[in-house]
């Protein structure tokens, strides 16, 4: 991408944010994160779990959650995507499976959002197929859609409306994962 294209993309993404609706501010997101950390600690704090964030969406959520988990754990990651930088779903792409053994382990999968749930369900099934003792799921945002999902996350930060949301690790056309609040695209 040349300099002119980058400048145009910057302008487009700045306009996207300026027109977006703020759904949850930084303070609300922080409170939700702390509540999740307490629930995860109560459930998994004594089991020395393996945490598997789903990159790249879970990077912000995971980075903010880890310091709040005051118990020993192991850390690895997976990279499975359905969306890429498009606004609508597509095929699964497995870039990286867990490198650590999950056999006999309590595993916690972390992701930014549970939309239709197909990606999370596929990852959970893969972890269980690899011999995990248990597999829990945690998402910062649970999208309220009008159809059944293949799974319900064990730990949820915030329920978000059925709109295209971004921020707090979730992207809008590849941008704005770095925001510490959650927004919805205007008109979506």
Image (spheres, rainbow, N blue to C red):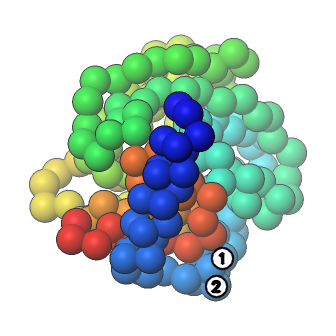
- Front-most of 69 and 45? 69
Q: Is residue 145 visible?
A: yes
- Front-most of 186 and 59? 186
**Residue at (46%, 18%) from the top-left corner?**
94
78 versus 16 height, above or below? above
**Residue at (58%, 18%) from the top-left corner?**
96
- Front-most of 7 and 184? 7
Residue that badge 2 annotates: 27
Q: Residue furthest front?
A: 4
Residue 29 at x, y percent in the picture: 58, 75
Residue that badge 1 annotates: 30
Q: Secondary structure at mark 2?
A: helix
Q: Residue furthest left?
A: 147
Count neighbours of disc 1 (C-alpha within 10 A) and say few if under 14, some if 14 to 19, many if 20 or more.
some
Residue 61 at x, y percent in the picture: 63, 56
Count neighbours of disc 2 (C-alpha within 10 A) and say few if under 14, some if 14 to 19, many if 20 or more.
few
Asked which quadrant contains residue 12, the reply is bottom left
| 69 displayed left or right of 81 | right
Count of marks overlaid on the render: 2
Q: Secondary structure at mark 1?
A: helix
Asked which quadrant contains residue 41, the reply is bottom right
| 151 displayed left or right of 145 | right
| Marks 2,1: beta carbons within 8 A | yes
**Residue at (35%, 32%) from the top-left corner?**
82
The label shown at residue 14 is none
Residue 163 at x, y percent in the picture: 26, 65
Residue 18 at x, y percent in the picture: 44, 76
Q: Is residue 140 visible?
A: no
């Amino acid at each position: 991408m040349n300099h002119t294209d980058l400048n145009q993309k910057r302008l487009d993404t700045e306009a996207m944010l300026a027109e977006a609706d703020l759904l949850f501010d930084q303070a609300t997101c922080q409170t939700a994160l702390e509540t999740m950390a307490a629930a995860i600690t109560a459930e998994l704090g004594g089991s020395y779990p393996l945490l598997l964030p789903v990159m790249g969406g879970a990077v912000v959520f995971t980075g903010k959650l880890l310091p709040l988990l005051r118990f020993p754990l192991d850390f690895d990651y997976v990279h499975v995507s359905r969306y890429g930088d498009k606004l609508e779903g597509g095929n699964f792409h497995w870039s990286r499976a867990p490198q650590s053994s999950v056999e006999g382990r309590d595993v916690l999968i972390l992701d930014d959002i549970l939309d239709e749930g197909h990606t999370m369900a596929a990852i959970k099934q893969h972890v269980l197929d690899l011999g995990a003792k248990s597999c829990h799921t945690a998402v910062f945002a649970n999208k309220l859609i009008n159809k059944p999902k293949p799974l319900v996350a064990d730990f949820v930060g915030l329920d978000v409306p059925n709109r295209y949301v971004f921020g707090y690790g979730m992207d809008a056309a590849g941008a704005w994962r770095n925001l510490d609040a959650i927004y919805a695209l205007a008109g979506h």
